[in-house]
Image: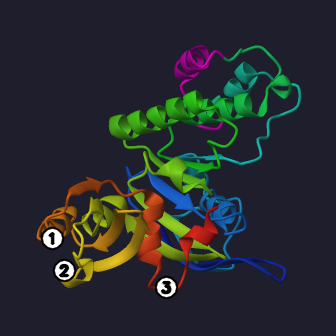
């Protein structure tokens, strides 16, 4: 389990993170979302032991990460900016990793490289950005660590490769309890894989929620009501309301079944319960704090 308690990090007079408290359960796929400059990369580097917090406590399974080799061997960090040794090949890099990660599986590495159709003996500096991202993911999975930290990992991958990487992460979580933390500025990129999400903004945590819990607390309904029907008379706690012609779309607090049942009392001409997107959940959850999530993720 990853625990941060009141963690802050500054660089001279720049506050990158302020009073961050998060809990990431083992085996969860945790999405860390926020705009550029929100502090996502800084938090991941703190978790990876690259930076040391100025204030606060950060532990993985009860142990501090900073200068703790035993803990660092159980985690893998994929930076947004890929770095590999000059003039090396993927196979040479894998053999180097064998000396760092005790559980590194060279056979698994070779199989994944073949599956992704990446050459083992070609110089990495000739790879495209997307190929380097794929190589980083493959090295991380072959390392067999308990935790993997991904900074904008899907950026630069085509849709097919994105789905392939997501499927691999999901399989590793199910098979051996891997815990990925995936940082992204794109809410839509995370909603089909993450089961827990934290929203960073200006170095602080705006929101941390289990997605299943969020789904139980709100519903989205599209309907066409008969003339004269008053949606306000139902007493719904409506968060978002959008009318386009005769079609009314609402997001309200409460279970989808409860919301649909109340609207049914108005004898709608048409009614359909729709799934909420992650962005719509954030709109609902952040309105109380006075933030408009639509302005944070454009």
Is residue 283 one of those drawn in magenta? Answer: no
Q: Which residue is mark 3?
A: 289
Q: Earlier in the sequence, mark 1 or mark 2?
A: 2
Q: Please tell me whether mark 3 sits on a helix, a strand or a loop.
A: loop
Residue 214 horizontal side relative to residue 81, left or right: left
Disc 2 packing (10 Å; few <14; some 14–19; many ≥20): few
| Image quadrant where residue 125 sits | top right
Dividing the image into 4 quarters, which one contains the C terminus? bottom right
What is the spatial separation of the Cα atoms under label 2 and label 3, in whole angstroms? 26 Å
Please state which of residues 270 and 234 is positioned toward the viewer in this rendering. Answer: 270
Mark 1, secondary structure of its residue: loop
The answer to which quarter of the image holds residue 215 is: bottom left
Query: What residue span does the magenta drawing correspond to?
Result: 100-117
- CB atoms of marks 1 and 2 within 8 Å: yes
Give the labeled residue for mark 2.
234
Color theme of the render = rainbow
Left or right of 125 on screen, residue 186: left
Question: At 34% across and 68% down in the image, what residue appears?
Answer: 250
């Amino acid at each position: 389990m990853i625990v941060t308690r009141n963690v802050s990090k500054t660089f001279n007079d720049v506050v990158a993170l302020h009073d961050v408290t998060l809990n990431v359960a083992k085996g969860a796929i945790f999405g860390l979302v926020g705009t550029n400059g929100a502090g996502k990369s800084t938090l991941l580097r703190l978790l990876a032991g690259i930076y040391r917090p100025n204030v606060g406590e950060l532990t993985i399974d009860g142990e501090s990460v900073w200068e703790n080799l035993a803990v660092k061997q159980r985690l893998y960090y994929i930076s947004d900016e890929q770095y590999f040794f000059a003039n090396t090949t993927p196979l040479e890099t894998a053999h180097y990793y064998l000396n760092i990660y005790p559980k590194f599986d060279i056979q698994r590495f070779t199989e994944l490289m073949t599956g992704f159709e990446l050459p083992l003996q070609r110089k990495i500096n000739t790879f495209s950005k997307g190929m380097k991202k794929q190589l980083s993911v493959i090295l991380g999975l072959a390392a067999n660590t308990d935790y993997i930290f991904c900074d904008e990992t899907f950026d630069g991958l085509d849709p097919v490769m994105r789905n392939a990487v997501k499927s691999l992460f999901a399989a590793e979580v199910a098979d051996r309890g891997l815990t990925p933390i995936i940082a992204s500025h794109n809410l839509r990129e995370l909603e089909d894989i993450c089961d827990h999400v934290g929203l960073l903004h200006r170095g602080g945590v705006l929101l941390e929620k289990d997605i299943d819990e969020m789904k139980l607390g709100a519903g989205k309904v599209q309907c066409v009501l008969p003339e004269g029907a008053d949606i306000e008379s139902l007493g719904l706690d409506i968060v978002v309301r959008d009318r386009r012609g005769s079609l009314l779309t609402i997001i309200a607090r409460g279970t989808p079944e409860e919301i649909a049942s109340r609207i049914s009392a108005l004898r709608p001409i048409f009614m359909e319960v729709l799934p909420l997107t992650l962005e719509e959940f954030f709109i609902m959850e952040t309105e109380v704090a006075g933030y408009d999530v639509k302005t944070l993720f454009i």
